[in-house]
């Protein structure tokens, strides 16, 4: 089980190693994760993160592209974390909720865990979400897959059996979920992490995929500009042209569909089919500002 003493205390010899107690997002916090894989990164290793790809993470760990810049979503998630954890503690006065240190798995110093809080011998993660897409019935383990990866990673590092997830949805709705340790899933994550670290050590670059983060990483890699022509293969040319044509056709179809959806919604807010939400209309200054799809792009690219 995890260390149940104060956050800065040493873990038992058979348990995880306490790396330190760091402010989330601080230079020390980033340094502790630099040579390993944190819970928010393991989903990228598996190709399941909406924010980072295996390719971009590999290059970031190599120091070839800049660290991730803090977005507004990341900022507010960090700011809201204490309040969400406090809400959890208020609703569970019988549970011992306290700060958590940064852990490394015993024998695997590259497997890093930064749980938001300890809850007795269990863990707590605080999340914020724009809407409830991907979140199932409260009290279940029906959460977005990249968060599930994070929870299982932390459980595997610490030896805890359960991770609570407290989430604030759309700024005002509070829900709780639980993820219990699954040894088979944890093994998949652990083996994928070990392979990734081995690829880092041996300069085995991941393949280029269709993730936006991969493209952004590639854009950062060249330094300077040489005014020269660079030959490419006919196969790459043909693939590029075919993809470009397909994109333009899909873009036209999507624009037409969005127009019909907005026309069907009228002055309403949401387009639905039965209980399924299809899209949400947002308004600014009395006029339609955006049409937001309820489906997110699949993350396993």
Image (tube, helix red, strand yellow):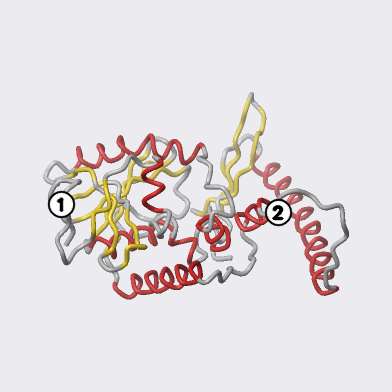
Q: Quadrant of residue 239?
A: bottom right
Q: x, y percentage for residue 44?
A: 49, 61
Of 226 and 238, nearer the camera is 226
Residue pictured at 27% horizontal, 66% vertical: 181
**Pointer 1 or 2: first along the chain:** 1
Q: What element carries label 1?
A: loop
Q: Residue furthest top?
A: 285
Q: In which quarter of the image is the N terminus?
A: bottom left
Residue pictured at 37% horizontal, 45% vertical: 29
Q: x, y percentage for residue 253?
A: 76, 55
Of 27 and 257, nearer the camera is 27
Drawn side of residue 180 relative to residue 49, left or right: left
Q: Is mark 2 on a helix, strand or loop?
A: loop
Drawn side of residue 153 relative to residue 106, left or right: right
Q: Check the image and report above or below for 181 versus 223.
A: below
Q: x, y percentage for residue 213?
A: 60, 54
Drawn side of residue 102 relative to residue 70, left or right: left
Q: In which quarter of the image is the C terminus?
A: bottom right
Drawn side of residue 88 relative to residue 238, left or right: left
Q: x, y percentage for residue 177?
A: 31, 53
Judge depth for marks 1 and 2 and give the one in front.
2
Location of mark 1 (residue): 120
Q: How many marks?
A: 2
Mark 2 neighbour density, 10 Å: few (under 14) some (14–19) many (20 or more): few
Residue pictured at 19% horizontal, 43% vertical: 98
Location of mark 2 (residue): 222
């Amino acid at each position: 089980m995890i260390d149940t003493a104060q956050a800065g205390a040493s873990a038992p010899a058979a348990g995880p190693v306490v790396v330190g107690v760091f402010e989330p997002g601080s230079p020390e916090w980033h340094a502790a994760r630099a040579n390993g894989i944190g819970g928010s990164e393991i989903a990228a290793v598996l190709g399941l993160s909406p924010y980072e790809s295996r390719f971009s993470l590999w290059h970031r760990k190599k120091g070839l592209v800049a660290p991730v810049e803090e977005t507004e979503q990341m900022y507010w998630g960090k700011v809201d974390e204490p309040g969400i954890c406090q809400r959890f503690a208020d609703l569970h006065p019988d549970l011992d909720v306290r700060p958590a240190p940064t852990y490394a798995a015993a024998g695997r110093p590259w497997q890093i865990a930064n749980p938001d809080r300890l809850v007795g011998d269990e863990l707590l993660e605080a999340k914020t979400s724009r809407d409830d897409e991907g979140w199932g019935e409260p009290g279940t383990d029906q959460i977005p897959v990249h968060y599930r990866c994070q929870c299982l990673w932390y459980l595997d590092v610490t030896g805890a059996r359960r991770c609570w997830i407290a989430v604030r949805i759309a700024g005002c709705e509070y829900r709780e979920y639980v993820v219990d340790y699954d040894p088979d899933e944890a093994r998949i994550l652990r083996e994928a992490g070990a392979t990734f670290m081995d690829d880092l050590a041996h300069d085995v670059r991941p393949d280029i995929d269709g993730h936006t983060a991969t493209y952004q990483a590639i854009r950062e890699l060249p330094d300077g500009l040489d005014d020269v022509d660079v030959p490419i293969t006919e196969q790459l040319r043909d693939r590029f042209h075919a993809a470009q044509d397909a994109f333009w056709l899909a873009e036209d179809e999507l624009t037409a569909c969005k127009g019909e959806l907005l026309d069907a919604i009228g002055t309403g807010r949401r387009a639905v089919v039965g209980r399924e939400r299809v899209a949400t209309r947002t308004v600014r200054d009395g006029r339609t500002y955006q049409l937001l799809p309820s489906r997110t792009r699949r993350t396993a690219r």
